[in-house]
Image: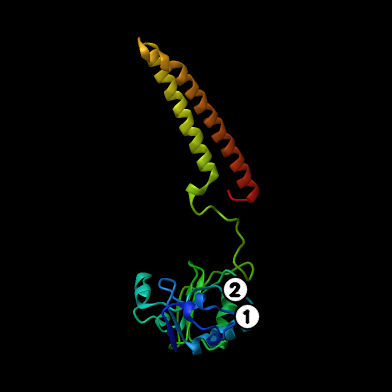
Amino acid sequence: MSFYQHWRNVPATAWRWPDFSPAEIACRGTGRLLVNEQALDRLQALRRALDRPMIVNSAYRSPEHNARVGGATKSLHLSGAGFDISMANHDPEGFIAAAREAGFTGIGTYPRSNFIHIDTGPARVWGEPFPDRVSRFAPDRPPAREKLADSRTLKGGGTAGIATVGAAGIEVLQDGIAETQGAVQALVPWLDTFRWVFIALALAGIAVTIYARLDDWKRGRR
């Protein structure tokens, strides 16, 4: 085994697993990398047998990162012998059969998180079975916005709402000043200008909202 304080320190000549990069196998929390040659040889053999890309969710974990993510105290990830592989582009049943053929002896299934853990530790199996799929691959679904705050629909609607309230507030303030006497009367024309500015912003916000909803509909995001 070889240990590196960061995956960028791995010499190009020392890496012999062409379908994987040091960054993929390194600890996600610290960037450290423990190269377990035997485990990586089996991972490369599995990749060749499947003849399809493998998405590595987690490979080596440093002790502190393993504790942070709630890993087992004796997790095989700590020795670079465990891998969590996404089932987004694999049939779980076929993957498990190929993994065993490649020499992996520990198999953990996590259908809710859509990945399978494989390792070279003692022979054991755990987890829930994956539900039957219509096809060999994960279902194709339209992408949804991960953060509502990033939605142009929300931003446009918010702009329209704030501007409408602002215009109404200006009108109330204008009526109040109109009832007073003295120098404040000179502010009335300016307030009228501000009201029209808010109205323009409200219309712009509504236009953005309509455009965003049409765009979302075209992209299948709603």
Residue placed most toward the observer, 53 or 177: 177
Q: Which residue is pictured at 37% across the width and 74% down the height? A: 66
Q: Are marks 1 and 2 in contact (CB under 8 Å)?
A: yes
Q: Is residue 66 above or below residue 207?
A: below
**What amino acid type is highlighted by mark number 1?**
Leu
Q: Residue 214: percent from the left, percent from the top?
A: 63, 42
How many marks on residues?
Answer: 2
Query: Of helix, strand and loop, which one carries label 1?
Result: helix
Q: Is residue 193 above or below residue 29?
A: above
Classify residue 123 by image quadrant.
bottom left
Residue 203 appears in the rendering:
yes
Give the numbered dot on residue 50. Answer: 1
Q: Residue 20: percent from the left, percent from the top?
A: 56, 79
Residue position marked by numbered label 2 in the rendering: 90
Q: Residue 140: percent from the left, percent from the top?
A: 62, 61
Q: Is residue 96 above or below residue 169?
A: below
Classify residue 93 by image quadrant.
bottom right
In whole angstroms, how far apart are the C-alphas of marks 1 and 2? Answer: 9 Å
Dot 1 or dot 2, earlier in sequence:
1
Q: Which residue is pictured at 51% across the width and 37% down the height? A: 157
